[in-house]
Image (tube, rainbow, N blue to C red):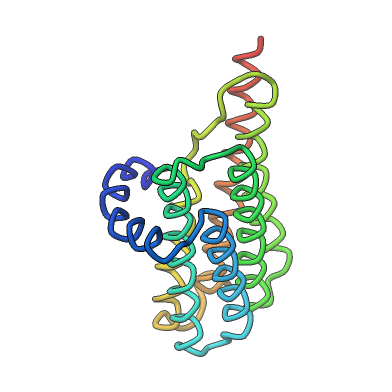
Amino acid sequence: MTLDGLRPVADELLKPFVSLSVRVGLTPDRVSLLAFTLAAGAAGTYYLAGDDVIWYLVGAFLVLANGWLDLLDGALARRLETASEGGDLLDHVLDRYADILIIAGLAAGIGRYALGLAAVTGVLMTSYLGTQSQAVGLDRAYEGLLGRADRLALVGLVTAIAPAVSGSIVGLTLVGWLLVVFAVVGHVTALQRFYGALQALS
């Protein structure tokens, strides 16, 4: 979760965007919906990409924009003092669907469906164990190697450079190896959170 440590810096950079959002009348929920729409667009571009450099670059831009808006909705809610449990729920649900779509698009684009399944279940179990800890009376668990911000940054970076890296490495393209990382790190992080919760409850 390396990028989560930069949240204070991001909050400062977000201030002009928060002010602009207030002026044009955006609400946090609308920003969350816009972020999800961009994630769905990214999934579609990755599915269509093939070896097309432009599609991958468009997808990278949409993913990074999704991540930026994901930060903006929370900052906007704090500015407007409209933060609520309902808004938090909407944000988390849309984030999970966005994760599913982006990973599914990446996997379908390279025809690696089993790898995509392993990656998406790792990501979802990481998120589930984070909130399930809270459901049993503990603090929400955030520990782990890759938070959502890190994953989105990796997707944006890898898909931006993937077309320049031709061929495969041990049978997988760069995007394929990205899915491997998400699968392995996701399930390791989920088990780490599960073990930590059990220890705290015992």
Quick check: 195 above or below 110?
Answer: above
Quick check: 14 above or below 65?
Answer: above
Residue at screen point 54% across, 71% down: 38
Residue 195 in percent (x, y) is at: 62, 24
Q: Nearer the viewer, residue 50 or 91?
A: 91
In the rendered structure, the answer to whether residue 105 lies left or right of residue 163 reads: right
Residue at screen point 31% across, 47% down: 11
Residue 85 in percent (x, y) is at: 61, 37
Quadrant position of residue 127: top right
Location of the C terminus (image quadrant):
top right
Quadrant position of residue 161: bottom left
In the rendered structure, the answer to whether residue 130 lies left or right of residue 136 reads: left
Quadrant position of residue 84: top right
Residue 34 in percent (x, y) is at: 55, 66
Q: Nearer the viewer, residue 61 or 171?
A: 61
Quick check: 164 above or below 191?
Answer: below
Would you say residue 153 is visible in this rendering? no
Residue 18 in percent (x, y) is at: 36, 56
- How many numbered discs sit on the rendered protein? 0
Location of the N terminus (image quadrant):
top left
Residue at screen point 49% across, 68% down: 63
Would you say residue 93 is visible in this rendering? yes
Quick check: 108 above or below 29?
Answer: below
